[in-house]
Image (tube, grey):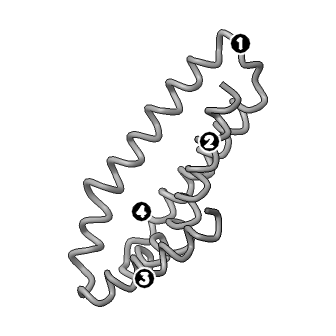
Amino acid sequence: RSMLLMQMKHALAKHAIEEENVIYPALRDAGKVEQADALNRDHGYVKQYLYDLENMPNDSPEFLTKLAKFRAEIEAHMRKEEDELFPELKAQLSEEKNSHLTLVMNKEGFKVA
């Protein structure tokens, strides 16, 4: 469990840096300030879940319960992004701006690779 949690924490950190430093500011620039702030707030709760899981004994009966709740919240967050907000943002921006955001997001990801 410790190793899997560490891998998950690393993957989510990379993902968060990309979104928080590139995509959420772009959402704000596109007039979706409340939505970007809500997604950013969700990332704070992700960090809290990771902290709680990391500081919980691996054999705790609460571990799997907490992990299941965490997964459900992550999936809801992803659905909001992937099914609604990101497609709206992409449609609102030019092809050139979309390409630029992709490039900048990939550069951000390398910071934590």
Position above or below: 79 against 29: above
Residue 35, numbered label? 4
Residue 32 sits in quarter: bottom left
Disc nearest the viewer among 1 and 3 = 1
The answer for how far apart the CA atoms under marks 1 and 3 are is 44 Å
| Coordinates of residue 41 in the picture (x, y in percent) | 56, 54
| Coordinates of residue 26 in the picture (x, y in percent) | 43, 78
Disc nearest the viewer among 2 and 4 = 2
Q: Tag 2 or tag 1, which sits nearer the N-term?
A: 2
The answer for how far apart the CA atoms under marks 2 and 4 are is 28 Å
The answer for how far apart the CA atoms under marks 3 and 4 are is 12 Å
| Location of mark 3 (residue) | 29
Residue 3, numbered label? none
Q: Say what amino acid the circle numbered 2 marks.
A: Gln
| Location of mark 2 (residue) | 7
| Location of mark 1 (residue) | 60
Position above or below: 113 against 102: above
Is the N terminus in the top left, top right, bottom left or bottom right quadrant?
A: top right
Q: Residue at x 21, y 75 (%)?
A: 91
Q: Residue at x 71, y 12 (%)?
A: 59
The answer for how far apart the CA atoms under marks 4 and 1 are is 35 Å
Residue 65 sits in quarter: top right
Q: Say what amino acid the circle numbered 3 marks.
A: Asp
The answer for how far apart the CA atoms under marks 3 and 2 are is 32 Å
Q: Tag 1 or tag 4, which sits nearer the N-term?
A: 4
Q: Tag 4 or tag 2, which sits nearer the N-term?
A: 2
| Coordinates of residue 46 in the picture (x, y in percent) | 59, 44
Disc nearest the viewer among 3 and 2 = 2
